[in-house]
Amino acid sequence: MWQSSSDFKLVSSRNLVISAGKQRFLFDPTVVKSHWRSQNTIACISHAHTDHIAAFESSLQKIVTPPTLDIYRALGGKPSKFHPIVPGEEFSLTDGGSIQVHPAGHMLGAAQFVLEKNGARLVYTGDFNLTSSLTVNGANPIRCDVLLMEATYGRPDAVFPPRERVYAEIAEWTSHELTKGKIPAFQVYARGKAQEIIQIVNTYLTTPVVVDSTIAKVSEIYRKYDIPLEFINERSEEGREVMRQGGYVYISSKSLRSPKSIFRHQYVRAAATGWAQLYQLKKVDRAFPLSAHADFQQLVQYVQAAKPRAVYLTCGDTVTFGAVLEKLNVKQIVPQRRRQLELLDFV
Ligand SMILES: [Zn+2]
């Protein structure tokens, strides 16, 4: 059991600053303030999506997984003061305790952080997904006392269909459009979603996949970690030739609003995002509910398996999911303005 109630404090909720003994931890901070730049402040970067990597630009010590570091570098980043850590390793705290990482299932390299001190355990999930995809294995819930969890899809109507069914629908639609002589064009995130779409096409069809150069750079890192993606960079000679001939799938991380500069053939636009389950997406011909996040059922499943005494929701529909936590008999940690919170006081 923990020895004192001051083991974990929520110092700032806006930036998710947690103190544990003499050290402070920033989990995916979006802003890094200069007065945090002491040796005792460590930034934990959970994965390579742009809204989670601001700390790379800071002079803070950083804990990060090797794939996240590689993706950041592949896209031109020059990280400093980092400590790569893989699942199974431990990063020791100066005054006792440790930090470990566990897979988060959200994209290559995505990590959950486990902070242990004086017998108490705090988990920060980052963005997570319990379902395995064609590119990454699903996450496992981690038993803990305090859980800092995303709730992007924390509303009861946000329940996704089985992933295999969405894959089959994507493959079927893609194949159908190709037989009509059209180019199926997906506009998706370069980091994570693009690689999953490449793998869907590689798995279900024999059609070549052409990607923009940003997606190509990230996909090379997936290959480095033994995820055998087959794709062609649009800027390569082969890419230009395939695009001249037609009969390919195009994946872009940029807007497809001025497609005449890209396509010589007729094209159809598709999106792949969890929001397609909840909203009618505009400016696309087809939208598939393919998400790298936990849906509502998975969020509930995580809380039930982790058995935390208290949960702090880091993003999403915190009011709706807060009511769900109440039904599950789990306390919701609600930040108070300008006040540090002793997290274990909730426990
Ligand atoms: Zn993410």
Image (cartoon, rainbow, N blue to C red):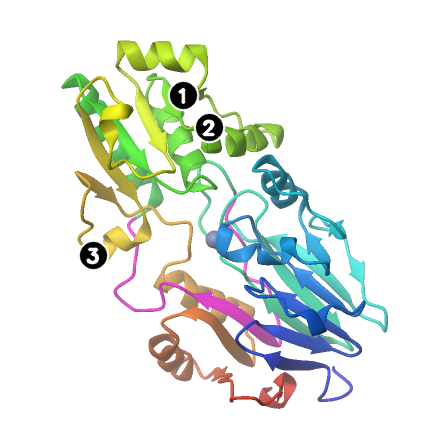
Asked where in the image residue 58 lies, by quadrant, the reply is: bottom right
Q: How far is the residue under mark 3 from the one under mark 2?
A: 30 Å
Q: Report the span colored magenta.
A: 137-161
How packed is label 3: few (under 14 Cα within 10 Å), some, or many (20 or more)? few
Q: Mark 1 and mark 2 in contact (Cβ < 8 Å)?
A: yes
Q: Which residue is mark 1?
A: 234
Residue 6 relative to residue 180: left or right: right
* Magenta highlight on residue 145: yes
Magenta span: predominant SS is loop
Counting from the top left corner in percent of width and height, residue 136 is at 51, 41
Residue nearest the observer in this picture, 141 or 4: 4
Pair 3/2: label in front: 2
- 37 versus 287 height, above or below: below
Q: Which residue is mark 2?
A: 213
Q: How far is the residue under mark 1 from the one under mark 3?
A: 31 Å
Counting from the top left corner in percent of width and height, residue 258 is at 24, 33
Residue nearest the observer in this picture, 190 or 107: 190
- 41 versus 236 height, above or below: below
For badge 2, the amino acid type reads Ser
Residue 275 relative to residue 225: left or right: left
Residue at the image point whose x is 33% and y is 39% from the top: 164
Residue at the image point whose x is 18% and y is 48% from the top: 282
Q: Which residue is mark 3?
A: 279
Pair 1/3: label in front: 1
How packed is label 2: few (under 14 Cα within 10 Å), some, or many (20 or more)? some
